[in-house]
Image (cartoon, rainbow, N blue to C red):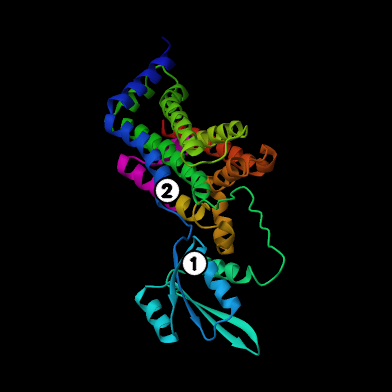
Amino acid sequence: MSIFQSLIKKEVLHLLRDFRTITVVLAMPVVLLLLFGFAISTEVNNVNVVAVVEQHTDETRQVIDRFRTNSYFTFKGIVSYGEAENYLRKGRADAAVIFRTEDGKLKHQIVVDASNATMAQTSTAYLESVINSGTTGLPVVTNTLYNPQLKSAYNFVPGIMGMIFILICAMMTSVSIVSEKETGTMNLLLVSPVRPRTIILGKLVPYFLLSCIILILMLVLSYTLLGIPFSASVINVVWVTILYVVLALSLGLLISTIASTQVSALLVSGVMFMIPVVLLSGMIFPVENMPLALQWFSCIIPARWYISAMRVLMIQQLPVGYVLTEVLVLAGMTLCVLALAIKKFNVKK
């Protein structure tokens, strides 16, 4: 067995013996994926609605009947102005629709509880569509591309993948190398005849293999439980993710040259990766809605480019040519970070 293989075997045995860590590493992606896929949803359902009608007409009856039969609404009944205000104040209704007739024409006003802005905007759009659906003789045909059921899981899966691989590859790799420094075994390895790059590769390969296992696990869950449509583009998803994993491993190596203790490595990883990935990568909040300064700052966050590429490849299922910009940026980041990490590691050595 070669020295390189021996180093890989040593690191694999170290991982397998740390049962708690390996359990957390394998369970965390599953929990997060299922949590964001099923429990956390941006979809608005079961909107409680009341109606205020000054004068009943055939048109008002038709609109109210549509409220009763629409699965997105729970119609609470027809009430007076004062009762509608009380319903909204007490939280018994999310919206009130006021119908009044002026000059022989039916007009409506929508009053929405906007304490939850997202729900208020979505509820208003739902109500408008139901009210206006019967105003013309021509049917309105809407085609929703790529996500016809408007499942929020489609939005969260690429984001969770971007966050998980940063956590697993960067944070755990940096902590693993720093722990060798704390115990003094890294110095013993560096003064041995083994080349430094062989030592580093020997420590990185097990985490790369672990990331591949996690990738397979997440893809299986995404294409089965979460219902993301499967296609040949999964090949592109795999190799773009591998590029992202290599970048994350390089970031972990770079952190290990900066941090001197495991605690400092975790703090640096948390500040550099966790907060920016969640807030500025487009995982939850659209980058286009951010101030211009933050949009430019988000360009240095690898997860922004990876999540954007995954949405095109996994959700839209378009060819890799549509994500060439994202792939080139990730490749450029990988080369720069890896070169900087190796240079700083050699200086530390």
Q: Quadrant of the C terminus?
A: top left
- What amino acid is at disc 1? Arg
Q: Is residue 319 magenta?
A: no
* Quadrant of the image containing the N terminus: top left
Compared with 102, 242 (above or below) is above
Q: Is residue 274 magenta?
A: yes
For label 2, the crowd category at 10 Å Cα-Cα, with few meaning under 14, some 14 to 19 and many 20 or more, is: some
Q: Nearer the viewer, mark 1 or mark 2?
A: 1
The image position of residue 72, as x and y in percent, is 49, 62
Q: Say which residue appears at 66% left-offset and 44% top-offset.
A: 325
Q: Are marks 1 and 2 in contact (CB under 8 Å)?
A: no
Q: Position of residue 43 (x, y in %)?
A: 48, 57
Q: Disc 1 versus disc 2: distance between alpha carbons?
A: 26 Å
Outermost residue, bottom side: 103
Kindly identify which residue carries mark 2.
38
Classify residue 334 by image quadrant: top right
Magenta span dominant secondary structure: helix
Label 2: element kind: helix
The label shown at residue 68 is: 1
Query: Mark 1 vs mark 2: which is more N-terminal?
Result: 2
Question: Dot 1: few (<14), some (14–19), or many (≥20) neighbours within 10 Å?
Answer: some
- Highlighted range, magenta: 249-275
Q: Is residue 243 left or right of residue 78?
A: right
Camera sees residue 104:
yes
Identified by mark 2, the residue type is Phe
Q: Nearer the viewer, residue 121 or 26?
A: 121
* Residue in front for this viewpoint, 9 or 217: 217
Where does residue 249 sit, x and y in percent of width and height? 47, 34
